[in-house]
Image (tube, grey):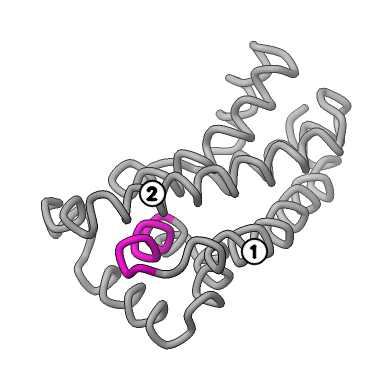
Amino acid sequence: MMAWLAQHTLVYGSLGILATVLLLPALEAALPLVGTLLPGQTAVVMGGLLAWHGHIPFLAALLTALAGAVLGNLVGYAVGRRWNTRLLERLPPRLLRPRYTERALGLIERRGGSAVFVGRFTAVLRTLVPMLCGASGMPLRRYVWWSVVSAAVWAPTFVLIGYALGPAGPG
């Protein structure tokens, strides 16, 4: 998947790469229906890999991944505030198993803001937690704090993983 993504974003140069590193994580967290299909974390790793190869500056990959994660979380939160869980209830169970929603809600109830942190590092939860935090009425200020903290750990972690993979990956 990463090789395919890298090949297709290289065609558009550094702006295409940065747009991918920004948009895929943002859309992954913002759209609970579509987010489960988007490789946001893969795009961030690819950004680090392509930074190693000199296609984009390392700092640009890092800041773009951070911005995408935070923006996506904020949109996902707003979607949850506006539509509650009605969007998820309309999904066929084969697309999103109810146990994932239950697991995410339980995590939010038990852990509060730290659920945002844990959710950022867990594939399915990364798409559900922002919307469910908005739906559950978590205060925006608290949500933003945890969203920024989690993105500030997540983005460098996965950009650095890609950067470390640079010598072995496509460039």
Mark 2, Cα crowd under 10 Å, few <14 / some 14-19 / many 20+, is many
Measured in 3D between alpha carbons, the distance from the residue under mark 1 to the one under mark 2, in whole angstroms, is 18 Å
The residue that disc 1 covers is: 150
In the rendered structure, the answer to whether residue 163 lies left or right of residue 124 reads: right
- Magenta segment boundaries in residue numbering: 127-137
Picture quadrant where residue 138 is located: bottom left
Reading the chain from its start, which is encountered first: label 1 or label 2?
2
At x 78%, y 43%, the residue is 62
The one of 97 and 80 positioned closer to us in this rendering: 80
Q: Which mark is residue 129?
A: none
At x 43%, y 41%, the residue is 38
* Picture coordinates of residue 16, whole percent (x, y): 64, 18
29 w.r.t. 17: above or below: below
> What kind of element bears circle 1?
helix
167 w.r.t. 142: above or below: above
At x 75%, y 47%, the residue is 159
In the rendered structure, the answer to whether residue 64 lies left or right of residue 123 reads: right
* Picture coordinates of residue 76, whole percent (x, y): 41, 49
65 w.r.t. 141: above or below: above
Q: Is residue 165 magenta?
A: no
Amino acid type for the residue under numbered disc 2: Ala
The image quadrant where one finds the C terminus is top right
The residue that disc 2 covers is: 78
At x 41%, y 80%, the residue is 107
In the rendered structure, the answer to whether residue 170 lies left or right of residue 79 reads: right
